[in-house]
Amino acid sequence: MKKIFVTLIISFLFFSCSASKKEKRNGFSYAEISTATGGKWVENEYIENQGFKNLTHLKVPQQHTDHSYFIRYEGPGWESEKVGYRLYLDWRNAIDVFGKKTTKSILNQVGQDNFDSYHNMQDWGMDILKVGNSLGLGSFGRYDGNEVHHFKKVDSTLVSITNKTDYSAVNINYFGWTTADVKTDLAATLSIASNSRLTKVDINLSTDFYGLCTGIVDHQVDYITELNPEKEWNFIATYGKQSLVPDNLGMVVFFKNNDVTNVKKDTDNHLVLFKENIRSVTYYFAAIWEKELNGISTKKQFVEYINNTLNSLNNES
């Protein structure tokens, strides 16, 4: 009897340790888009909402624009246990950051109690980035030499959500995106893996195109970069008191040298400009907030994170 009892104890301890390691290793990822139901459109505003419903696919209504109160937190969201992101699914097309004070999933609660309650600190965290007229963090647009064009004129927009065991993604198809003299279809996939802060961005264009760009909103804090032409991957980053709290927030974009023609600053952004006539491109971005649970809280740690990620990208190539 004693031998059986000891065996059971050892088995229990082994199982507990194994489960703990597995949980730590796997983490989670999640993506969603959620729309209002039971109400009606009055011009560009959805009123009398009876509750939100998560969808796997959505064709964005023609009347939808900023502050239409139709899409919960104004666009799709994606997260890991470390950080959350959202994209404004309207003419702004900017990417915002949800800072997390927990490792649990938070997106399904954001904006449920009040449409924009996430602008104030919650138990889980809050929206921490002021986007303004910029691209936010890592979104995409067209730079014509004078300004960045967002998505003010699009024939139609389709969105789908992917949630797999080890990654989640938001897939967006913009049909007939028109900026000045250029009209193109643009397909974008924004994906995040478990245990990662990185969003991977894959973009494909239907026509030859010049001026494709990404970037980071300029909040006049520390700008960090080290452009090494001998490496396949490079980066631009910012760090400082640029969150809405305010407190320290680090943001970084990683890109391939061979895809890029220039790095510069405009009125609102630190920009990465992709080469003319490029039809497909892949890059990454990440945000690091000092209130993240057991996360990165200093500029030194942020730079170490950048260097470690850069080394991984260059060694994978």
Image: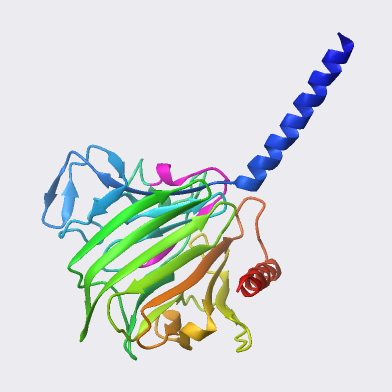
**Residue drawn at 28 percent across, 50 percent down:** 57
Specify the quadrant that holds the N terminus: top right
Picture quadrant where residue 59 is located: bottom left
**Residue drawn at 63 percent across, 88 percent down:** 230
Observer-nearest of 273 and 303 = 273
Specify the quadrant that holds the C terminus: bottom right
Image position of 167 with respect to 152: above or below: above
Picture quadrant where residue 210 is located: bottom left
Left or right: 140 in relation to 218: left
**Residue drawn at 65 percent across, 69 percent down:** 312
> x, y (%) of residue 282?
46, 72
Let me know if residue 236 appears in the view.
yes
Picture quadrant where residue 54 is located: top left
Left or right: 170 in relation to 235: left
> x, y (%) of residue 29?
50, 49
Give the extent of the magenta segment.
93-110
In reply to whether residue 206 is colored magenta, the answer given is no
> x, y (%) of residue 110?
40, 46
